[in-house]
Image (cartoon, rainbow, N blue to C red):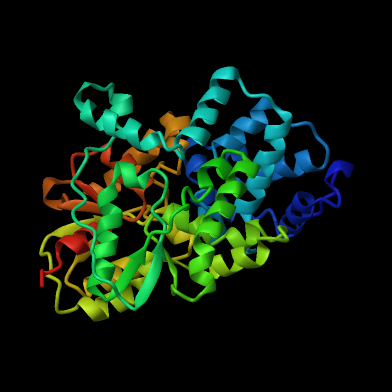
Amino acid sequence: MQTHLAPEFQNTPEGQEAEAILRKCVHCGFCLATCPTYQLLGDELDSPRGRIYQIKQVLEGHAPTRETQLHLDRCLTCLNCETTCPSGVEYGHLVDIGRQVVERSVERPPADARQRALLRTGLSSPLFGPAMRVGQAVRGLLPESIKAKVPERRDPGAWPRRRHVRKVLLLEGCVQPSMAPNINAATARVLDAAGIECVRPRGQGCCGAVKFHLADDAGGRAQMRANIDAWWPHIERGAVEAIVINASGCGVLVKDYGHLLRGDARYAAKAQRVSELTLDVSELLPELVAALQERVRPRTDVLAWHAPCTLQHGQRLRGGVEAQLAQLGFTLRPAAQEAHLCCGSAGTYSVLQPELSKKLRERKLGHLQGETSADRPAAILSANIGCITHLQAGTDVPVRHWIEVLDESLLKQ
């Protein structure tokens, strides 16, 4: 696809990157079949191909409108289109550029602007934890719309105290320690059982995804740099062998630090090294299976499996969790249909686009829960706090992180 950038975008990093991505576009339309919003709305402007053309027009000098902004807002950034695209178009990077450019040009309605500002600052704020605890304490009194975002508090259990030669850094995340602290604790216990110690460096925080995907480029990159600063002393002296992340949404962004900070003279090399060291916890499963084979009590019930978009499309990790846990005696059943489609969580999407988000959740749960009571799974497993919270709000079937179930199945020594 030929592009003629407007003068203000020529010789700029964002313009050059966008132009390189647009050159790969061939207008084939394969992505339409796997785009959740196109499947729901049937409007090509709400498809990857349609959004690409809108971004192209803006970069060529056409003034964006509120309508342009709405079509970009409706994108889940699930990246299903990237795993479908035969030309290897980096749609995720392009839509981020498009959102940043449009955000600078189009003023949002006041209520929309306030909501986004609250999400950008609130989710990574030190006040989020206390606010969540208050919400959990009065959960039964909350309106359903808010209650859906406040999971019941569960005892995370003890953090392992043993020391091991093998160490990894564990990114705890911004909302996960408050919403589901048991996920991090379970991760530490499972790795501890395999002889790996989880280190939680001071100074780490939000991966930067919330701000970055809400068009706060500077704020998102500042959080990336803060994490690198927190991790670098451990990396520099060779004290850890990996950065392990159990929220696939965070993982896909941290693996992209090298790209996102490539133009930062001070952080480029460090960011690239961080990306190289980053692993989703599922990537350790072959090693965990070998180490824990004799220590796991298999489950005989059927567990439904929802692979988050950030795992199967963002990180291109498909099939590993089901196959590896099968070796430990677990039966994970993927969605009967449309296992590749998003559940509608997508970071802050369920807050900003509630109607579309709920439709996608109902569609996903219908495929996960089966058609009859006999098909009903004992639990639904996933790998991302956003998906887990979102799906749980639509069903009474327990929704858990797979590592929690593995932790509960460990035989005590």
Query: Is 353 left or right of 298, judged from the image as shown?
Result: right
Picture coordinates of residue 233, whole percent (x, y) = 52, 66
Q: Is residue 235 at least partly visible in the picture?
A: yes
Q: Position of residue 133 (x, y in %)?
A: 28, 34
Side of 211 where 12 appears, left or right: right
Q: Residue at coordinates 21% horizontally, 50% vertically from top-left?
A: 156
Residue 47 vertical position relative to residue 259 in the rendered view, above or below: above
Q: Position of residue 157 (x, y in %)?
A: 18, 53
Assign the N terminus to one quadrant of the image: bottom right
Extreme-top residue of the structure: 110
Q: Quadrant of the C terminus?
A: bottom left
Residue visible at 12% across and 46% down? 373
The quarter holding residue 17 reads bottom right
Q: Nearer the viewer, residue 159 or 51?
A: 159
Identify the image quadrant of residue 113: top right
The answer to whether residue 84 is visible is no
Of 221 and 31, which appears nearest the observer?
221
27 vs 353, left or right, is right
Residues 212 and 327: in front is 212
